[in-house]
Amino acid sequence: MPMMTVTINGKEQQVPEDTTVLGYLKEMGIDPLRVVAEVSGVIIDKKNYGGCILKERDVVEIIQFVGGG
Amino acid sequence: MRDDLIIAGTSVRSRLITGSGKYRDERIIKDVLEAAGCDIVTVALRRVDFDRPRENVLKHIPKGKVILPNTSGARNASEAVRIARLAKAMGCGNWIKIEVINDQKYLLPDNMETIRATETLAGEGFVVLPYMSPDLAAARRLCDAGAAAIMPLGAPIGSNRGLRTRELIEILVAEMSIPVIVDAGIGRPSHAAAAMEAGVDAILLNTAIATADDPVAMARAFRLAIEAGRSAFLAGLGSESRSARPSSPLTGFLETEEKV
């Protein structure tokens, strides 16, 4: 499988070319319902995680709620 | 008669808003919220740490509470707007506490950037509660920009120093038609009671409860103090004077002779 370079939560990494947001979250063991994904500045609707295929050089933010004041 | 706190048409019973940060063990949050009797809870947004995934804090917050995400970490208006949009995409409502801070020593908010962010987000339909330095001109601009309430600080975040900005907050209470919620600095129940006596609409607390030896007991203490302060405000406080004013009648002493 050809690889591509993306930056996820500030970390540059190699992922397979057809990686989707949903696929990445599953791979990492993260419940997709409790996070929000932003791909190169665009917030992805939760129901589109499976259809959102990452591209070379995408900058991805995976965000969650944490305790805060 | 009920004395609800009304923010943007939403009516809640409790005038104590609590934060969910700084707990040694987040499993205690549920009991804290119950003891505090609070209806609105703040949370923050952060990147998922894939190496050390953290529990979802929402797991500890019972259903039915209003979730108030903050924009902590934002250094300007556009970062706050970005964080607010991400928070909304989480699907827990459209409330947002704007927090724009570019001073790391005192964590004092940047009112000008806060006003800009408020304008944008209120325009997008968010219920916007901005954390601010207590300044009347800024408060008026926030109100004009569509803020649902204003949240002036009592003292720097986490300092537990109480209502140091009292005189300025009293001016906001007198002049503003939207709720005034003291956010930051309240360290003791007596501070909270004093702020409520001064007429503020609600108090947002985090550090004072979360870092107490017994957070659940402290949450209860704050609830009682805030209820007491609110009741005193509604009852109308007596006036102050420099000299004494007797509480008992000054006539009719046993040894005084009655003049016939």
Image (tube, grey):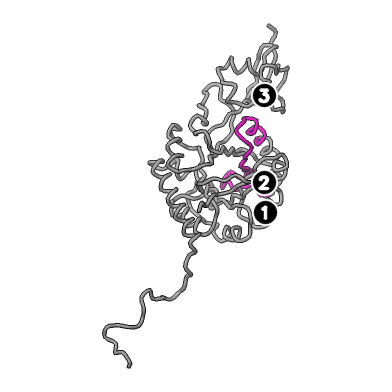
Q: First in sequence, mark 1 or 2: give its number.
A: 2
Numbered disc 1: secondary structure: helix
- The amino acid sitting under disc 1 is Ala
| CA–CA distance in space, label 3 to label 2 | 26 Å
Q: Nearer the viewer, residue A61 or A5?
A: A61
Q: Which mark is residue B114?
A: 2
Numbered disc 3: secondary structure: strand
Disc 3: which residue: A60
Residue B91: x and y, percent? 62, 30
| CA–CA distance in space, label 3 to label 1 | 35 Å
Q: Which mark is residue B89?
A: none
Q: Are marks 3 and 2 in contact (CB under 8 Å)?
A: no
Disc 1: which residue: B138
Q: Is residue B230 above or below residue A56?
A: below
Q: Is residue B131 left or right of residue B81?
A: left
- The amino acid sitting under disc 3 is Val
Q: Nearer the viewer, residue B256 or B137?
A: B256
Furthest toward the front, the residue is: B1
Q: Is residue B107 above or below residue B228?
A: above
Numbered disc 2: secondary structure: helix
| CA–CA distance in space, label 1 to label 2 | 9 Å
Q: Are marks 3 and 1 in contact (CB under 8 Å)?
A: no
Magenta span has B89? yes
Q: Are marks 1 and 2 in contact (CB under 8 Å)?
A: yes
Furthest toward the top, the residue is: A1
Q: Is residue A4 above or below residue B185?
A: above
